[in-house]
Image: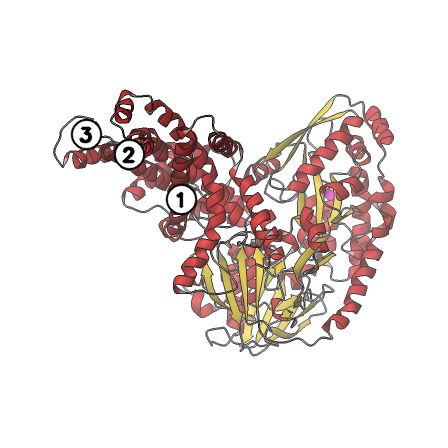
Amino acid sequence: MAAEGGGNGLAVYALRRAVNAIPLILGVVVVNFVLIALAPGDPVTSLIGEYPAPPEYVERVRRDFGLDRSLPERLGLYLVNVAKGDLGFSFANRQPVLDLLLQRLGRTLVLMLSTVVVATGVGLLLGVLSARKPGSLTDRGATGFALLGYAVPEFWLGQLLILVFAVSLGWLPAGGFRSVRVDYTGFAAVLDTMKHMILPMAALSFRYMAITTRLTRASLLEVMSAQYIVAARGRGLSENAVLWRHALRAAALPVVTVIGYNFAFIVAGSALVETVFGWPGIGRLMYDSIYTRDYPVLLGILLFVSVTVIIVNLITDALYAVLDPRVRY
Amino acid sequence: MTWLNPKRVLIVLAAFLLAAPAIAQDTPVKGGTAIVVLGSDPEHLNPGISTSYPVGAVGVNVFSGLVRLAADGRPEGDLAASWTVSSDNLVYTFTLREANFHDGTPVTSADVVYSMIEVEAPNHGRFKTAYDKIASIEAPDAATVVITLKEPFAPLLSLLTVFDAAVLPKHVYENTDALTNPANNAPIGSGPFKFANWVRGERVEIVRNDDYFLEPALLDKVIFRIVPQDVARSTALEVGEADLLWGFYMPPADLPRLEADPNINTWTGITIPALYFVFINNNTPGLDDARVRQAIMYAIDRDQIVEQAQGGLGQAGSGPFGAGFAYAYDEATDYRTLYPYDPTKAKELLADAGVTDLKLRYVYDSARGAFAAAGDIMRDQLRQVGIDLVLQPAERAVMVDRVYKGDYDLSMQSFTSGGDPAIGYHRIYHSAEAGTPFVNATGYANPDVDAWLAEAGGLADQDARATYYRQIDEVIAADVPVMVMFDELASEASSAGLRGMRTLLDQRDGLEFLWFAKP
């Protein structure tokens, strides 16, 4: 965090971080590749299906997908292809991996981004409410709610939400990305998808809402005893102005850090939640490809996840500069 | 549970068939869209290069085969209007109907020959079994296909259905790689439905083919909706987001709930027979003694496993080939009388064999709830006779790796018969292909059994086959290379308005007969 000053300091910093990320991504790819290759289970078995196949046929399938080569040979070939922008060919889907990822990407991003926004927004609000009067009923309510969020697993919450809101009450669809019976177009289609998104988003965001609430509360309580807050109060500012304008800005720093940190966990959580709700996104694809030992797809997703996490962390660091005048790049 | 003997099951089946006209009395009407649940995305939609369940579910409704299996298991004409078999059971001559592919091109004998030889023989696990017995497939004229066998092979016709030998359009596949041809994702067949649309991970849509060579379908459209989580599948049906849930995807625990729902119809019975059994590793020290394997048979209460692990959707094992094929069943060696639940007898046999402190690993596919539940029950019951069972759940790919390389002691499996014991069940006992996945993994090799299985598989006459199966039943009953657990009963559930189900054996087939009763 060298204090270079000037408008392009951030750009230089971002570029340097991006260059630094290259060996990191390379490391991620190599480790993933080796780990997946060493995991027990043979992709050819799931490709052929549950029926005995003649050995020469099995050998041919193995050859067709390049699985007869040695591990270093496969790894080298994969790295060269990735550098060229080719993520390989899916065994199970018989489609280029990149095409598959791009088909699913939008749906997962919509789900993840709205989860981050809702979890952060609600979490901040609850955190502020409970920090305002520690020990009050609101505080205890919000803290208890947050504790629940830590304790409840996403897939279980998802199933519970389906039972309550789809089966018993019939308010919301039980799963899927849009209605199957009716073909909506235009705005009605957007509304339809939003309706389908409410439950998975709720299931996915609960935990991060909880983390944000707890963190905001703790960090606010710490800031509220700082001298500049005492000074602000001394100048006669209203308690609300002190809280929202002065304290929260400083208290938000760790919360922003956690957004970046959480992002990777939200991707992991989406694999479960997308499976429970039949949401056809990247998380589902990951779950399916683990099950069928579809190595190229799995590697492609892990690569995508690691790149996304690096980008999100970069954005978080940039946000520091905006939030905290002491931070300069 | 003696009331569920094979005869009873047949009577129930017959009663059902007799009841069918009563259901059919409200007249079928055209129109409507049915939503059918699939548990996972199909890999592609070409049933000619895969035996995968979801590929078949969609594919067999888009394509046709030479023959199809009627509800009684007998082959009837599909693309073939008729066929003759030579007196030596070696030459089958098929005459084709006039039919078109969905792109308007006529279906000819050249398409049949091309599909079988160029695409299915090298790429389709089950058709390969039939192709090994075939000397030649020829097309003397555009409407005739002649298949000549190397030796008589009883199940040939049941391997010429759309499931194992779909007729693909030669003009689309010729001079391309069948595995990567784009038509695999947008198939052109001659079946009752045409491919319309596929959103990966979400749905596949097929629409009625009005140019179908048999009676056109009644539904306008079928949407296969992909619901990966088993709990969510019954929910989809309950909240009206799906119309049909096949047995393959039915979570047994949810069945009572669906049965109680007035808006849902359920059905339970044997469709294509399938056998649940436990491989006993005959090479494990201790288990190499037949008396110990018999002791395990006595030590396990199979009725309890059916009730508690399978939700009652099974019939306790009656013999090595189950209860689905009358000619392969022998009352004299029925396991339910031969091997009742008898822990005392089990202990005697173990003492006879001089086996103490036996510790066995039970390896199973962790995704199969019934296998896990059966493991719990087996552990308790084996403990009572002094055998220690260690449960080792493994992810499916790992389980396959371990079991078929012999790294297990007991392992529960379920095999489909494929419509004939020679197709699906012989592999459990035959020693020929040991070491490859989904065949005999026990190390049991009996030259007599191998030879009799080969004979039984070659004969078309069921009485003649029965003689061999009796001999096999007797030897297997003493040797106990595997523990036959139960015959699977399938159940399916549909929205109350959906009619016309199960005119054929395989649940995936015959969507063209479905229709919606007007409420």
Q: Position of residue A255 (x, y in %)?
A: 35, 32
Q: Is residue A126 visible?
A: yes
Please name the residue that numbered disc 3 is placed on: A328
Please name the residue that numbered disc 2 is placed on: A245
Left or right for A118, reference B380: left
Does the stretch in magenta take in B21?
no
Chain at tag 3: A
Asked which colour scheme the image uses, the reply is secondary structure
Image quadrant containing the C terminus of chain A: top left
Q: Earlier in the sequence, mark 3 or mark 1?
A: 1
Q: Rounded to the nearest whole Å, what is the CA distance between mark 3 and mark 1?
A: 29 Å
- Label 2: which secondary element: helix
Q: Quadrant of residue B37?
A: bottom right
| Residue type of the residue flagged with mark 2 | Arg
Q: Quadrant of residue B261?
A: bottom right
Chain at tag 1: A
Instruction: Tell me the tag on residue B323.
Output: none
* Front residue (pair B361, B393): B393
Left or right for A92, reference B15: left
- For marks 3 and 2, give the one nearer the viewer: 2
* Front residue (pair B144, B510): B510
Q: Residue furthest left?
A: A6
Chain at tag 2: A
Q: Earlier in the sequence, mark 2 or mark 1?
A: 1
Q: Quick check: do tags 3 and 2 share a chain? A: yes
Which segment did they paint magenta? B437-447
